[in-house]
Image (tube, grey):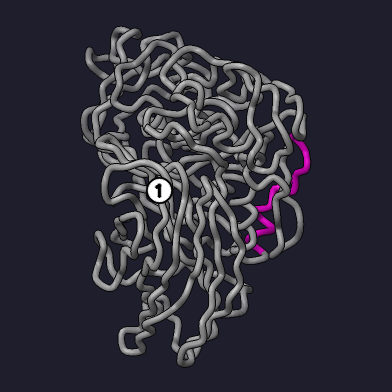
Amino acid sequence: MKKNSRQGCKYCLFLFSVCLLSFVFCLLIDKAEANNLNVSTVSLGNVSLGQVTAAVQFNISWDNSWRTAANYDAAWVFIKYSTNAGVSWNHATLKTSGTNPAGFSQGSGTALDIIVPADKKGVFLQRSANGAGSVSTSSIQFVWDYGADGVISTSTVRVKVFAIEMVYIPTSAFYVGSGGTETSAFYTYPTTTNAYLIASENEITVGTTAGNLYYALSTYGGDQAGPIPVAFPKGYAAFYMMKYEISQGQYADFLNTITSAQATTRYPAQTTYRHTISGTYPNYSASRPDRACNFISWADVTAYFDWAALRPFTELEFEKAARGDSVSTPNEYAWGSTSITAARDISGAENGTETITNAGANCAYNNTTFIGGDAGTGPLRCGIFATGSSTRVTSGAGYYGVMELSGNLWERPVTVGNTTGRAFTGLNGDGALDGTGNANVTNWPVTDAVGAGYRGGSWGNAATYARASDRYYAAFTSAGRDIDYGGRAVRTSP
């Protein structure tokens, strides 16, 4: 498990250029970090007019990486390109899928595998062997199939390369529900103290026959109906989850890489509760880019997911990421215990290196007013509780190393509590939004947010909502933006 995440959840973006034949690229560089995630020395080579491909080469590094027999971290790397001087951006398609495919190069330095999913919308870069510490790898090479994207060799092309930190959640059985007193928590019928074991991706019967999955009727917990279909992602199968919630820096860069009309729809335009994104298209920026991004609606977060070729996660996957394959502890938080201490004291300026200094603090909850830093109430920097010596409990980490699953901002999973949610089939985004800036993926809950819910609590809520199995708002529908609404994405493992 990842225990020493040091910095927040920025991602790296670089615009690169090289003049080769008539395929012209324009170079700009804008450094950003997450665990010092750094993409550098980007270049273009091996342009093939016959195969209509080009090789994108770069160096990558990040700190606090790990791979064990249980799981590992990774970087999801994808490319956006523009053929109209940055007026609009499109998602690049890679040439070949598979592990370390032909024409791609793993480079030199820390040994990394290149995992290209079947849709070829990006790459997972991850350690090839067990190890921990910093990654530093040079001359990694991807092959872009620019012909598949309709780009001609005489085009003037601008390209941005993005990387987002992820955590691999392996295939395994796991429990939902803790046997505790959480509102509307899952259990094995008829005994509410028995957690329910998910041991496959098969259909799950919901009902009042012994051995069924069930949960108590509550205002927002759901309709107690089913079944949960085979296609609904249940968390048994492997997936990758964003290590952190979407940061304000990430969301600003997203706004700058969609069209002006789309950005108008997706811009929160807020200045309170520690939200710092401001500006105008295409120059939005966040003065606190590492801070988790609040004031984003279901439509906002799913647009981000689709743009990045990721997807929403389900509430079953949420519990898997929090609990792993361990036995449930009644009323546990995402870090596997029932101890919790609210963050209060912020050390230093909030520039991405700030820490929380009051003893034992491991969660932002209970509407606590911060002392120091920018003060006020609102979300904190992503990964703020993790240090080089922190444990799972003191860092507030889920079982596999995903941060802030309890507290900070509400997580936005797809619910099992209504028919719209249960129709979700787990398709990944394709990198493209509709004209108004909405996600347009089949069977995702749409802009009215029916089918989406809330798990994990927030900085503004009492501790009970932060418990890993609490389902008080699991099927609550809210389409708007609010002070403690955030989000993170996943991608099904290739």
Q: Nearer the viewer, residue 363 or 131?
A: 131
Is residue 188 inside the magenta stretch? no
- What quarter of the picture does the N terminus occupy? top left
Residue at 22% across / 28% down in the picture? 199
Quadrant for residue 26, please give it.
bottom right
300 or 380, which is in the foreground? 380
The span picked out in magenta is 261-273
Q: Which residue is mark 1?
A: 443
- Would residue 424 be seen by someone viewing this image from the given angle? no
Counting from the top left corner in percent of width and height, residue 47 is at 38, 84
- Count neighbours of disc 1 (C-alpha within 10 A) and say few if under 14, some if 14 to 19, many if 20 or more: some
The kind of secondary structure element at disc 1 is loop
Picture coordinates of residue 177, whole percent (x, y):
37, 18
The answer to which image quadrant residue 400 occupies is top left
Question: In this rendering, is residue 398 above or below 444?
Answer: above
281 or 421: nearer the viewer: 281
Residue 326 at x, y percent in the picture: 30, 21
- For badge 1, the amino acid type reads Asn
